[in-house]
Image: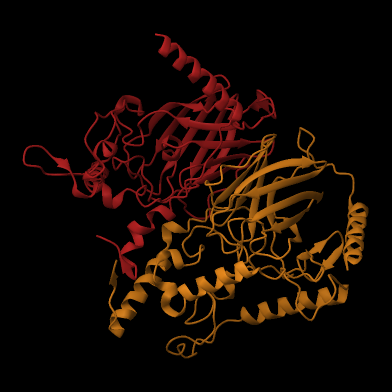
Chain colours: A red, B orange
């Protein structure tokens, strides 16, 4: 008991020392509003498993399987990951827990899922698109001033400048689309158009065409929470619009910041390793 | 000599004071407003040409430089002769992305067309210190480092591995330096600044790189954390934003710099259309002295678009696989590790 008390006391002292020694950015007091609107500044993150599958899904051994002697087993390229490569369960973020695919599009989703290793743009560190960027397992920072609303994502260094004045139709398709923001009371509504057909919604092969239109609604629920809703419309892929929703949480650690995950460098071996002069072990 | 430098600085400081007007462009918290979309493109070179002695160009000299740029561009923009022969096998001998067997022609380039004007002075170089406008000599250590790298990448060696290819070709960073914000004299010298009481975000259009400067911070990242573009912390000194950047990765070198590179930048909004940007580069293991430069950022009334580089990067795989094919043709094999 005494040992325990000593250890406990030591832990407290050491812990206090750690906090005292760790430099903490002093931030100016966080005002509730910016230019009359709710202050969206901060580092935000979703806390769910939607990036694995936006629909409700049980835990499973891997994202890629091959037929096994008894049940399907993790495919050779991912078997070494063991428990790290397994998928945690999650309740879906889609309203009604169903995506109204057109028949051809549903077929494509199943093909995508079966060929996940070759097809998921996340594996190659491609830009995540919207809404996927918001619920990837990485934080993002909103920079909100009287003149601008800018989203900087940790994953792949993706960015969105939210135009507060509509510049008209996007002149060219892009991965992250063109974002135009308006306020409806205290809700920031961002209409995103001008997408290419390359990004996915998750690692389960859910996809869209270049006709995608996403209308996002960010509604503050206190200083540290945003309620996020997005309506997905794409008549080439879905029979009707559908909706996702989730809370977004603000990192309240005073030291919170966006780190860098420039994964382009991390996938060079995957994408270009076969072209090296000196070949590594295959 | 020392006196001369002091005098030169005094002169610069004096011009600064004269040129500074009361600033109405402020954010709601009273700081100078640096926000907007800016271009740092210019035809003023980073280093002063050897045959030019003065930092300040006369109006006639500047006009001559700008006219020559315009005439050259007009010449290059003339329609190509549809009956021209194919380029010679192996390329025409010119170098760079626009040369060889034909890469980008002038249509794709946007290197700037104006002489840099800072505090009313037309400048012959962006570098203002040392007074000769040139980057100080490299240290022995830096020369040895450079020599080793050149040896490693000699001849076809530069095509051996993706890591040997330039950062821009790997879609990791822009063609030009991103810290400091020196123009690349090529294209895409566009940046956006968004400013809050706690952060200043500087976005380089290429490659959608947002450098988020932490204000009110006192310490840099731990030494072993070295993000691309470095770790930037900033503070306001009066009406000047001062940004201090360290923790560069060793692969991101500015004119041969090492991981000890230390960059201090000063942003000063001088009028509705201009930020005066000043940078100081210090790296004792590379340069025999620190050096500083000034660049005007001009407000743009255009938008910035997505520069999705990696997603369409056929160049890197083609460059590397081309080299492997060439080796096969010549009878050399891919080596096993």
Residue B302, can we see it? no
Tell me what residue is drawn at x 45 percent, y 73 percent.
B158
The reply, left or right, for residue B38 in relation to residue A227 is right
Give the quarter of the figure containing the N terminus of chain A: top left
Residue A187 lies in quadrant:
top right
Point out residue B105 in the picture as x, y percentages from the top left corner. 55, 76
Relative depth, front residue between A23 and B71 = A23
Point out residue A201 in the picture as x, y percentages from the top left corner. 36, 40
Up-down relation of residue A60 to residue A282 (above or below)? above
Tell me what residue is drawn at x 88 percent, y 60 percent.
B9
Q: How many labels does the image show?
A: 0
Up-down relation of residue B104 to residue B127 (above or below)? below
Q: Which residue lies furthest to the top in this view?
A: A1
Relative depth, front residue between A191 and B304 = B304
Residue B162, can we see it? yes
The reply, left or right, for residue A271 in relation to residue B287 is left
Relative depth, front residue between B163 and B289 = B289
């Amino acid at each position: 008991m005494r040992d325990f008390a000593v250890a406990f006391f030591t832990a407290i002292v050491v812990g206090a020392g750690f906090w005292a020694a760790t430099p903490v950015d002093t931030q100016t007091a966080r005002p509730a509003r910016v230019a009359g609107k709710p202050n969206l500044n901060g580092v935000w993150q979703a806390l769910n498993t939607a990036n694995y599958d936006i629909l409700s899904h049980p835990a499973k051994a891997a994202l890629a399987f091959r037929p096994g002697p008894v049940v399907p087993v993790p495919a050779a390229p991912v078997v070494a990951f063991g428990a790290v490569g397994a998928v945690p369960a999650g309740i879906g973020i889609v309203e009604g827990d169903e995506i109204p695919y057109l028949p051809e599009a549903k077929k494509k989703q199943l093909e995508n899922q079966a060929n996940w290793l070759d097809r998921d743009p996340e594996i190659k560190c491609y830009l995540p698109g919207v809404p996927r960027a918001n619920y990837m397992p990485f934080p993002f920072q909103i920079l909100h001033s009287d003149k601008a609303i800018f989203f900087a994502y940790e994953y792949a260094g993706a960015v969105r400048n939210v135009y507060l004045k509509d510049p008209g139709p996007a002149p060219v398709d892009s991965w992250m689309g063109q974002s135009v923001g308006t306020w409806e009371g205290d809700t920031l509504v961002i209409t995103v158009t001008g997408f290419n057909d390359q990004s996915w919604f998750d690692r389960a092969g859910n996809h869209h065409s270049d006709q995608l239109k996403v209308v996002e609604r960010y509604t503050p629920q206190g200083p540290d929470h945003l309620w996020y809703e997005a309506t997905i419309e794409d008549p080439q892929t879905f029979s009707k619009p559908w909706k996702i929703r989730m809370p977004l949480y603000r990192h309240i650690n005073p030291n919170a910041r966006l780190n860098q995950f420039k994964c382009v460098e991390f996938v060079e071996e995957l994408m270009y390793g076969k072209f090296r002069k000196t070949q590594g072990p295959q | 000599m020392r006196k001369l430098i002091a005098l030169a600085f005094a002169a610069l400081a004096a011009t600064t004071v004269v040129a500074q007007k009361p600033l109405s462009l402020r954010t709601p918290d009273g700081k100078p407003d640096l926000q907007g979309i800016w271009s740092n493109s210019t035809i003023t070179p980073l280093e002063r040409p050897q045959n030019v002695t003065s930092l300040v160009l006369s109006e006639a000299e500047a006009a001559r430089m700008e006219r020559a740029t315009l005439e050259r561009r007009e010449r290059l923009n003339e329609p190509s002769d549809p009956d021209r022969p194919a380029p010679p096998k192996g390329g025409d001998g010119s170098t760079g992305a626009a040369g060889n067997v034909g890469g980008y022609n002038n249509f794709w380039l946007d290197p700037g067309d104006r002489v840099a004007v800072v505090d009313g002075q037309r400048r012959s170089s962006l570098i203002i210190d040392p007074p000769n406008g040139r980057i100080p000599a490299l240290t022995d250590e830096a020369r040895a480092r450079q020599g080793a790298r050149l040896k490693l990448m000699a001849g076809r060696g530069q095509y051996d591995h993706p890591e040997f290819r330039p950062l821009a070709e790997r879609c990791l960073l822009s063609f030009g330096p991103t810290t400091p914000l020196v123009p690349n004299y090529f294209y895409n010298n566009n940046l956006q600044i968004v400013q809050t009481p706690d952060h200043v975000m500087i976005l380089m259009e290429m490659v959608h790189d947002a450098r988020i400067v932490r204000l009110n911070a006192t310490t840099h990242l731990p030494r072993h954390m070295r993000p691309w573009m470095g770790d930037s912390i900033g503070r306001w000194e009066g009406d000047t934003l001062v940004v201090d950047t360290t923790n560069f990765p060793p692969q991101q070198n500015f004119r041969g710099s090492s991981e000890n590179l230390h960059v201090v930048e000063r942003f000063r909004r001088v009028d509705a259309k201009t930020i005066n940007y000043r940078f100081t580069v210090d790296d004792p293991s590379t340069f025999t002295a620190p050096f500083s430069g000034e660049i005007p950022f001009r407000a743009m009334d255009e938008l910035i678009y997505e520069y999705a580089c990696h997603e369409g990067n056929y160049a890197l795989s083609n460059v590397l696989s081309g080299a492997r094919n060439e080796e096969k043709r010549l009878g050399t094999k891919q080596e096993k590790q």
